[in-house]
Each structure stands twice: as structure tokens, then as C-alpha cells.
Amino acid sequence: MDASSGAPPLPIRALKEPVALAEDIDADGEVTDAGIERTAAAMSRILQAARRYEIDSFYAFVTAAIRDAPNRETVLDGIERTAGVRPQFLTGAQEARYLAVRRWYGWRAGPLLVLDIGGGSMELALGRDDEPELALSLPLGAGRLTRACNATSPARPAPRTRCTG
């Protein structure tokens, strides 16, 4: 991306590699061996594409699904062993910051409330200035709630039930 000071970040190339990691998180929240392998293989393919496009700086980050997994270090080790890069992760509070949204919408947008619902967490940020007045990361991601409320088949649609977990 072109991240010139004072301007919105503009993507030069967009590379996406679906992993569907939620299908490979067990009842204890651990990423299965199959999930680790699929994630590492996806990272390898993205890095190969980055080299083809002569991208000179590459920063790999994982989000809540891996950050909060009890076997996080095993997952990161597997990615590093396969792809040759060890991803970093943001804390929930860092992930909740809304700086990119503020830059995209500008100061004239006034106060912003940003909701970011991911697979493992939901981030909320509220504020008007460069730093949000409130920034929260909650364990309310779509995948996590699906697993908690539908333990029999977490990766498939199921009849609606009331979640008591």
C-alpha cells in the first residue's frame, strides 16, 4: 500500500487467501493441525505472490482466532517453519484502535463509533480525536459465538437456538 503521511492508505495490490480457520478450531479453542497446515500454506502462497510483485516490506499479523488460541505458540511455530516468517499479533486493545477509519473518513466526520466483528473477537472504538476515548476488544466474534452456542457443528449452519453460554 501507499501510506503517504497525511493521505489515506491506498492499496497497490490486494492479495487474499481464504483460510476458513473457524472450521479448524476445536471445542477448547485450539487450532487443529489441519488448520495450522492450511494457514501456513496460505501464508507461503501470499509471500510468493509478494515476491513476484517485488513488495519490499511485508508485515504478517494474526487476529483473535490465533492470538487467543491456547496453542498460539504452536500455530506461530508452524507458520514460521513452513512460510519462513513468524506473524505478529495485536492485543485486543490495539486491534480496537480506529486510526485507519479516522484517516479514511477524515476529521470532518466528527465522532466515530467503529464496530469490527471478526471471527474471534469484536472490537469497538468510540471517539473524535486521533486516539479513541473508548477502545474495547470483546470475545464476541462470529466464529467464537457459533462454536459456543452450537457445539455439535460449529462450521455449519444449524437451526436457530438460544445461546446460554
Image: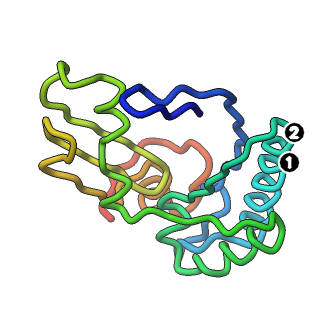
Give x and y (percent) for residue 106.
26, 23
Quadrant of the snapshot with the N terminus: top right
Pick the front one: 142 or 93: 93
- Relative to the observer, which residue lies in front, 131 or 30? 131
Q: Residue at x 59, y 74 (%)?
A: 30
Q: What x and y, as percent, mark residue 163?
A: 34, 55
Question: Which residue is drawn at the image coordinates 74% and 42% (left, top)?
Answer: 55
Secondary structure at badge 2 equals helix
Q: Secondary structure at mark 1?
A: helix
- Circle 1 crowding by C-alpha within 10 Å: few under 14, some 14–19, many from 20: few
In the rendered image, the vertical position of residue 78 relative to residue 146, given as above or below: below
Residue type indicated by callout 2: Arg
Q: Point out which mark residue 52 bears.
A: 2
In the image, 103: left or right of 59? left
Give the residue type that dot 1 points to.
Answer: Gln
Q: CB of mark 2 within 8 Å of CB of mark 1?
A: yes
Q: Which residue is mark 1?
A: 48
Q: Residue at x 57, y 57 (%)?
A: 61
In the rendered view of the protein, which quadrant contains the C terminus?
Answer: bottom left
Quadrant hosting residue 90: bottom left
| Residue plotted at (30% across, 39% down) | 115
- Residue 24 placement (x, y as % from top left): 67, 62
Q: Nearer the viewer, residue 68 or 51?
A: 51
